[in-house]
Amino acid sequence: MALAHTILAVLSHSPFSGYDISKQFEEVGVGCYWQASQQQIYRELGKMEQQGWVTFEKIPQEGKPDKKIYQMTEVGQQELRRWFGEPTEPMPIREDLLVKVLAAPFMPRDLLVKELRHRRQLHTEKLLEYQAKEAEGKVCLPVPVDERFRYLLLRRGIRYEQDWVDWCDEVLDFLKQQESGPSQK
């Protein structure tokens, strides 16, 4: 999947400025599964405009550069539809922590424990953030269909973070059991 398709998916909900699109990437909805900097988004919007996938309307602002409000064109909708019809494949895992676990039998265990605790904390914080967002959304039921789809993305983010926390706990438990076992390096 390309960043452009994620931007088209965001714009399918509503026209947005580049800044507002980048805020969508920081929010739980898109942030659960795709990361992009504001600079990457603006660069991609420029390419998308050249391809005819988006257009923009300039909104004058006093004391600031004009704001560009982007919207998807018919060509952009066709591209999103084309991409949407393609089969997806799982993304390969590229995770430094997993490589560290692979090397763990030959490295100091305390360093791995420290890293696992660090990662567990990061995933716990993200999990709590997502769960708080979920709790906010439950107050507003019933929700429109597009919000239900966003909720499903949030649920995937929650499961992802929960799985990381559980896995870190599993490895930490294993390491604790090993303390009384064979010699450590």
Image (cartoon, rainbow, N blue to C red):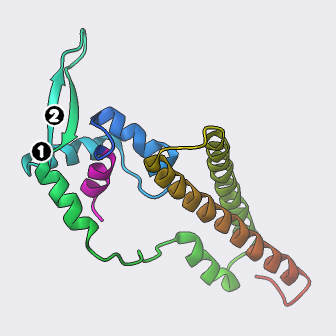
Residue 43 forms part of the magenta stretch: no
Residue in the image at 37% along x and 78% along y: 89
Which residue in the protein does label 1 denote? 49
Q: Is residue 150 left or right of residue 128?
A: left
Residue in the image at 19% along x and 15% along y: 60
Q: Residue furthest front?
A: 142
Q: Point out residue 133 in the picture as x, y percentages from the top left corner.
A: 61, 43
Q: Dot 2, crowdedness within 10 Å: few (<14), some or many (≥20)?
A: some
Residue 177 visible in the shown view: yes
* Image quarter of residue 176: bottom right
Q: Is residue 159 left or right of residue 11?
A: right
Q: In which quadrant of the rendered image does the N terminus lie?
A: bottom left
Q: Point out residue 64 in the picture as x, y percentages from the top left corner.
A: 25, 15
Residue 31 visible in the shown view: no
Camera-nearest residue between 103 and 37: 37
First-in-chain label (1 vs 2): 1
Image height check: is 52 above or below 65?
A: below
Residue in the image at 16% along x and 24% along y: 58
Q: Which residue lies furthest to the top in this view?
A: 62
Image height check: is 48 above or below 161?
A: above
Image height check: is 67 above or below 102?
A: above
Q: Give the range drawn in magenta.
A: 1-10
Q: Say which element carries label 1.
A: helix
For residue 56, the mark is 2
Label 1 is placed on what type of residue? Glu
